[in-house]
């Protein structure tokens, strides 16, 4: 691996952030400092923690940041469900986002497993 930018999970999670910002742009204005902010922060946390972890010297450190990214991925999953339940987003948009969120989770878990078996 050259940098975090070479990781597929990082690339997809950056795309996810863009999609989340577009999705939340239509949320009620009174939610800008509430659910909108929380959803955006959780989404940004995913690629940010991947990047920070990839800059570390040891797999153990990288794995720790990947677990943080995985936690943010789960937060995002929960927050979007709440947004759907509040009817801030449609079922269709929710389902589209969840597919990508779950994909990121699978890629994170795969990378964690790989790094655990290839200690540096």
Image (cartoon, rainbow, N blue to C red):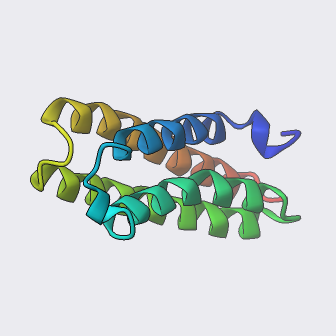
Comparing 85 with 34, the one in front is: 34
Q: For this view, does 42 lie left or right of residue 45?
A: left
Q: For this view, does 120 lie left or right of residue 102?
A: right
Q: Residue at x 75, y 52 (%)?
A: 118
Q: Can you give x and y, in whole percent of width and height, for residue 102 in the image?
A: 37, 42
Q: Can you give x and y, in whole percent of width and height, for residue 50 in the image?
A: 67, 54
Number of marks drawn:
0
Q: For this view, does 105 lie left or right of residue 67?
A: left
Q: Can you give x and y, in whole percent of width and height, for residue 98 in the image?
A: 31, 40
Q: Can you give x and y, in whole percent of width and height, for residue 84 in the image?
A: 16, 49
Residue that sits furthest to the front in the current view: 29
Q: Is residue 73 above or below residue 33?
A: above
Comparing 50 with 80, the one in front is: 80
Q: Residue at x 45, y 36 (%)?
A: 19
Q: Quadrant of residue 37?
A: bottom left
Q: For this view, does 24 lie left or right of residue 56?
A: left
Q: Is residue 48 above or below residue 88?
A: below
Q: Is residue 109 above or below residue 35?
A: above
Q: Quadrant of residue 90?
A: top left
Comparing 119 with 40, the one in front is: 40
Q: Is residue 45 visible?
A: yes
Q: Residue at x 55, y 34 (%)?
A: 15
**Quarter the N terminus occupies:** top right
Q: Is residue 106 visible?
A: no
**Quarter the C terminus occupies:** bottom right
């Amino acid at each position: 691996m050259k940098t975090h930018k070479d990781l597929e999970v990082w690339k997809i999670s950056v795309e996810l952030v863009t999609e989340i910002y577009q999705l939340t742009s239509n949320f009620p204005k009174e939610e800008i400092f509430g659910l909108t902010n929380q959803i955006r922060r959780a989404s940004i946390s995913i690629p940010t923690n991947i990047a920070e972890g990839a800059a570390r010297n040891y797999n153990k450190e990288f794995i720790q940041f990947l677990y943080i990214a995985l936690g943010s991925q789960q937060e995002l999953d929960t927050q979007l469900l709440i947004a759907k339940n509040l009817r801030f987003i449609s079922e269709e948009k929710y389902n589209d986002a969840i597919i990508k969120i779950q994909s990121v989770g699978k890629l994170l878990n795969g990378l964690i497993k790989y790094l655990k078996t290839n200690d540096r």
